[in-house]
Image: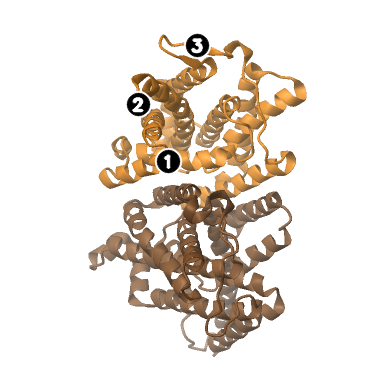
Amino acid sequence: MTRWILRAAIVVLALLLPRLMYPTLAVEILCGGLFALAFDLVFGYVGLLSFGHAAFWGTASYVAANFLVRTSLPVPVAILAGALAAFVISIPIGYLSIRSSGIYFSMITLAFAEMIHFVALQADQWTGGDNGIPGIPRRPFLGIDFSDSLQLYYFALFFIAIGFWIAWRAIGSPFGQALRAIRDNRIRAQSVGYNPRVQMLLAFVISAFLAGLAGAINTVAHGVVSLDAVHWRTSGEVVMMTLLGGSTTLLGPFVGAGVVRVLEHFLASSTAAVGIVTGAVFVVTVLFFRRGIVGSLLALDHWFAARSQAKTPGRQGEAAPSPGEVRAKS
Amino acid sequence: MSWQLLVIQVFNGLVNGAFYALLSLGLAVIFGMLRIVNFAHGALYMLGAFTAYLLGERFGIGYWPALFIAPIAVAILGVVIERLLLRRLYDIAAAYNLLLTFGLTLLIQDGVRLLYGISGQPYAGPPQLAGATNLGFTFFPTYRLFVIGMSILLCGTTWFLIERTRIGAIVRACTENPTVTRAFGIDVSLWVTAVFGFGAALAGIAGVMAAPIYSVDPLMGADLIVTTFAVVVIGGLGSILGSVVTGFMVGVLVAIGSAIYPPIANTLIFILMALVLLLRPSGLFGLQEAR
């Protein structure tokens, strides 16, 4: 019951968000949230810290921008093309990095993202190099006027919702269970018949596709792409959104994205100040707050549930679900 | 390409390689002992260069004293970071320490940027090493030759310290079996701090050496560290000798490659990394670590 109330509240919040803040900022939060959720698919559910997700976000941004600048195809086609491009480059990157695990995986993904960054810097006829691609045309589609920020928001929300649904289904499915099994005990998962590498690569490419989807929508919303999209800062930022909001909580990445984007919005006057504040928040989160906002709320809820159950010994209530289940359902 | 140009490129590559080697050596020393990858290594390198610059600008202290003072200052900061922050995360996944040092990188880098701006500052090298040296067939800047020699000297000394001395034996013992080492009355946690400080000093001294060649700016370490990560992946983590050899080798290969086909200059190192991952996933010298 409470679960349905919570779900309804989230839907209402998603619909009202552009009334509570600048609609453009709201779109940025949605895109950042889907990006972080995509990252968490690999980080939280497979246990691999990808430090190169900017490669997918950025590639999709550039591809979508090129489609809009060079062709007269409608906006949704450009968005899908961007996401597909991210998916395509993630196959070789994933194949090569998944052969390693732990800290090695992080370094390799970071290095590949840096390679994409250098390629973007050099291929300036496609990316505009240091200047980026300004003034991307967004032709109206089915009567949607993209220069109206409210219409833009609901258009973006539709696509983000699809992305969210894909991630949610993937996490809840037997495939998601297999990922967690591999994360928790790789050898055991292997012995019951899963091929860890295949499953991990699958998670990686789905994650890249969703990160690309988020990046492409973000590009459409902004009408510009800059080299920042493929910079390692972007890769670090998505880690921070996920950790701050709460890994493996589905909603956490969106909450984290909200906090980070609002912070950036208020500090926008100084790039250096953004770096200092994000750096400090990063350090504090990693040291003392690894559960994140949503994760901590869930833990608190859990604690209350356990306490009230302990006080009524006669009641044979539902056994408290394991944290993994709570996370998957919330 | 004439052979003279080729030799010049080899020397240019050795200069870049000198920095790759010093930085990846520092990463390897720290990783060997603490099992963490220090993302802040690039920021510490930048701080080394900045300290040298500020010493010159504020107090008129020249290159040679700075070559000693700056690494010590950076080492002290390293010790503080290890004692106050890194220490808290040794019991959990290594990824969290990478993230912690990433956060520190943002803090340090943008802190310097806020105080001194983003523009690059020139830094004069030692006057004794100004000009160029005749190599017989061509001239090469003397200071850059010094950088190559200095880097080899530092890497060699570090290798000797760790592989051939009692200090090294203690450090390796702390790495391989901290519990037993502690039972012998050795303060392992003190050695961990010392090793991190030493690794930080290596980054600091590399920064001072780089200051006269590249301009001193807050972002100088950031992109270098990511490239160094690729070098570390090529060489395989943990091996001291491997990281040094790979550093120089990659520097030379990239210099030659970019002379043949200039557009590839920035990406060649990552292509090399992809090739190594495909053919030898544990890195060129990775076997030594698997021992």
**Residue A244's x, y, as percent?**
59, 63
Which mark sits nearer the N-terminus, 3 or 2?
2
Question: Chain B: what color?
Answer: orange
For the residue pair B4 and A292, the one nearer the viewer reads as B4
Q: Amino acid at mark 1?
A: Pro
Q: What crowding class fits label 3: few (fewer than 14 Cα within 10 Å), some (14-19), or many (20 or more)?
A: some
Looking at marks 3 and 1 on the same chain, the residue that comes earlier in the sequence is marked by 3
Q: Position of residue B17 (x, y in %)?
A: 44, 29
Amino acid type, residue under disc 2 in the picture: Met
Cα distance in 3D space between marks 3 and 1: 30 Å
Chain to which the residue tagged by mark 3 belongs: B
- Answer yes or no: is residue A21 visible: yes
Mark 3 and mark 2 in contact? Answer it, CB < 8 Å.
Answer: no
Provide the secondary structure element on which disc 1 rests.
Answer: helix
Choose between B1 and A242: the one closer to the eye.
Answer: B1
Respond whether the residues carrying marks 3 and 2 are from the same subunit. yes
Q: Are marks 2 and 1 on the same chain?
A: yes
Residue hosting label 1: B263
Chain name for mark 2: B
Q: Label 1: chain?
A: B
The answer to whether residue A312 is above or below residue B251 is below
In which quadrant of the rendered view does residue A20 lie?
bottom right
Q: Is residue A218 left or right of residue B110?
A: left
